[in-house]
Amino acid sequence: MADVFLSYARPTQQRIEAIGGALEAGGYSLWWDKALTASDDYAMVIEAELDAAACVVVAWSKPARQSLWVRAEANEALDSGKLVQINLDGTRLPLPFSALSHLDFTRWRGERQGTLWHEFDTNVAGRLRGERGGGAADFAAAPRSGPALQGFGRIALIGWAAIALAALMAVAIAAVAAGRMAPAAFSALALAGLGLAVILLALAAFVLIRISLASRR
């Protein structure tokens, strides 16, 4: 039985061949569905190889995300603690796999040097040593992206705008006190400032609601 089971979608087979070749060059034995023959009971053979492998590398892509076979193999790997995830094209991983750590292979071109391959090889070797992957620690370490974090940048911009508005009003008050601004002009400016403050408050509330909704996904 093989050390590593490769799970992928057929449209990405050429890239998987490159990854498989690099793994074999590193001394790992592999199994993937290319080894199936016409006489095989596909489901039985895949299940047996999946169960026997010490590591399951799931290569996510847009076609893989839509593949029931890839999802089933990834679920089995997650449950058994054998999972190592890579992303071939930057597609968003399906739940719960998007909450787990994965490696970005979108720019990998076959090299076995550098940080990316070293981390990948370390993960694969760890599974072969019995180190479990896909557990609670992976969930805790997984980076979050998307609106839940991006919204805080908008909140910061709104905050700076509010500070600028407050500073402008302070300057206007000082100008009125020094007799350099007419009370009528100050009243108009204060009214405009109040309107702008209401708009900023509404924007802040809208962004906070979006952040709250995104964090529940």
Image (cartoon, rainbow, N blue to C red):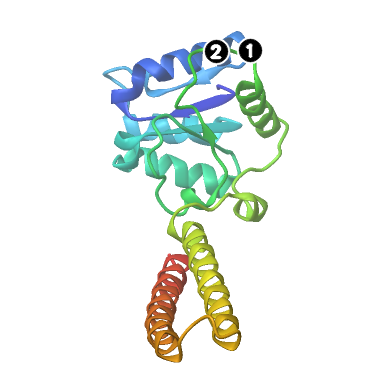
Tell me the quadrant of the picture where the N terminus can be found: top right
Query: Within 10 angstroms of label 1, few (less than 14), some, or many (20 or more) residues?
Result: few
C-beta proximity under 8 Å, tags 1 and 2: yes
Q: Residue at x 61, y 25 (%)?
A: 116
Callout 1: SS: loop
Q: CA distance from mark 1 to mark 2?
A: 6 Å
Mark 1: amino acid: Gly
- For label 2, the SS is helix
Q: Position of residue 8 (x, y in %)?
A: 39, 30
- Above/below status of 173 relative to 216: below
Question: Foreground: 201 or 112?
Answer: 201
In the rendered view of the protein, which quadrant contains the C terminus?
bottom left
**Most foreground residue, 130 or 48:** 130
Q: As displayed, is residue 7 above or below residue 187? A: above
Q: Which residue is the site of mark 2?
A: 22
Under mark 2, the amino acid is: Ala
Q: What is the number of the mark on residue 54?
A: none
Q: How many marks?
A: 2
Disc ID at residue 26: 1
**Horizontal side, residue 111 vs residue 9: left or right:** right
- Res. 198 image quadrant: bottom left
Count residues near mark 2 (Cα–Cα under 10 Å), then give few for <14, some for 14-19, many for 20+: some
Residue in the image at 52% along x and 42% along y: 77
Q: Residue 140: image x %, image y %?
A: 64, 55
**Place of residue 174 in the rendered image (x, y in percent of width and height, measured from the top left):** 60, 82
Q: Position of residue 6 (x, y in %)?
A: 47, 27
Up the image or down, 155 lies above or below 43; here it is below
Task: Please give the name of the residue rendered at 70% of the width and 32% of the height, measured from the top-left corner.
Answer: 126
